[in-house]
Image (tube, rainbow, N blue to C red):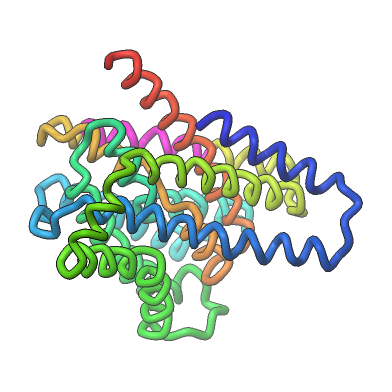
């Protein structure tokens, strides 16, 4: 994973230095925009194919994480609404809000499986937190960004469409194949590590996109460092809290990944769609922190096996 992350950064720097035409750069951008979600879809389909739908269940630690994520977001939204901070402070608070409410990463299924966690439990939580995020963010859009001319139901439908395309559709397809095409299901389940390697390639692409965002932003480096610090503190808090709650319910690994590993692509999309676009930097930087920590966890797991 660290090699994949460094490769993504290096790939963008090399790409930016090459004397390519405008048309070729536009093609490369469109290709990456298509390839990244396509690979995530395939990765999720392969991972979901290994799960029996009957194993998807609600647990108590799900409730605690849902309450903490939504509660922190609502509290910070009210702070922004009832105080008169500067725009810079509001952006830092919004960055923290997005890091906290952001749904669990689609790749959490792959990493949780590698770490020996409960794959079915994290899939169930991923579904629940995506629905919760769509509901809570849609409710508070008028407070967060009064300039957006969008009613609650409009915002909710927009977010649900996004969730359906990146999460629900591969699950439905996996359930259909498992039930009606068992031979195909057996075939796609055979390469056990394929979802992980798809994620490694997707991670490289994600870091290339993150590097591009940072390189092209007009925000000062001091402000980028501030957002980076906020996102790092949120990452530490969420993994630590997830581990503490999970340990109480004897599911430390799964709860830690469910709370700490974020769908930063979704976070960036929320930033550009509903919030100040500068907050999208929090998503790119958070992806660095949680993947570094996941790399450390996989290293520790490898040492003990």
Residues 145 and 177: in front is: 177
> x, y percentage for residue 297?
37, 25
| Residue at 42%, 71% in the rendered image | 162
Residue 7 appears anywhere in the view:
yes
> x, y percentage for residue 11?
71, 42
> x, y percentage for residue 299?
40, 21
Residues 280 and 21: in front is: 21
Quadrant location of residue 180? bottom left
Give yes or no for residue 105 being in the magenta stretch: no
Work out whether 300 lies above or below 35: above
| Residue at 54%, 66% in the rendered image | 275
Q: Main secondary structure of the magenta part?
A: helix
| Residue at 30%, 53% in the rendered image | 188
Is residue 198 found left or right of 226 in the rendered image? left
Task: Give the residue at the far top of this rendering.
Answer: 303
Is residue 238 found left or right of 210 in the rendered image? left
Work out whether 272 lies above or below 100: below
Task: Locate the C terminus by quadrant.
Answer: top left
Quadrant location of residue 175? bottom left
Residues 140 and 161: in front is: 161
Residue 67 appears anywhere in the view:
no
> x, y percentage for residue 278?
63, 57
| Residue at 45%, 71% in the rendered image | 143
Work out whether 152 lies above or below 286: below
Task: Specify the segment rendered in magenta.
Answer: 230-244
Task: Give the residue at the far front of this rendering.
Answer: 183
Residues 284 and 42: in front is: 42
């Amino acid at each position: 994973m660290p090699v994949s992350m460094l490769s993504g950064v290096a790939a963008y720097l090399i790409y930016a230095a090459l004397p390519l035409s405008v048309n070729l750069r536009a093609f490369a951008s469109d290709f990456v925009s298509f390839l990244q979600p396509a690979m995530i879809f395939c990765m999720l389909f392969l991972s979901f194919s290994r799960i029996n739908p009957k194993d998807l269940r609600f647990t108590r630690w799900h409730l605690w994480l849902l309450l903490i994520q939504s509660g922190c977001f609502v509290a910070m939204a009210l702070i922004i609404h009832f105080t008169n901070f500067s725009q810079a402070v509001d952006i830092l608070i919004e960055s923290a809000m997005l890091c906290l409410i952001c749904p669990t990463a689609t790749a959490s299924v792959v990493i949780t499986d590698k770490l020996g966690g409960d794959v079915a439990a994290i899939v169930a939580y991923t579904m629940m937190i995506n629905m919760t995020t769509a509901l809570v963010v849609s409710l508070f859009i008028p407070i967060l960004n009064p300039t957006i001319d969008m009613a609650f139901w409009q915002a909710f439908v927009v977010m649900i469409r996004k969730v359906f395309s990146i999460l629900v559709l591969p699950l439905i397809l996996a359930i259909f194949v498992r039930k009606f095409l068992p031979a195909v299901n057996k075939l796609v389940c055979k390469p056990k590590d394929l979802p992980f390697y798809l994620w490694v390639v997707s991670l490289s692409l994600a870091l290339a996109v993150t590097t591009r965002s940072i390189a092209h932003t007009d925000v000062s480096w001091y402000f980028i460092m501030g957002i980076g610090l906020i996102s790092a503190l949120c990452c530490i808090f969420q993994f630590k809290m997830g581990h503490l709650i999970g340990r109480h319910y004897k599911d430390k690994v799964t709860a830690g990944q469910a709370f700490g590993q974020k769908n930063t692509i979704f976070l960036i999309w929320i930033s550009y769609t509903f919030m100040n676009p500068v907050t999208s930097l929090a998503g790119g930087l958070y992806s660095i922190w949680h993947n570094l920590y996941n790399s450390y966890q996989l290293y520790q797991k490898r040492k003990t096996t």
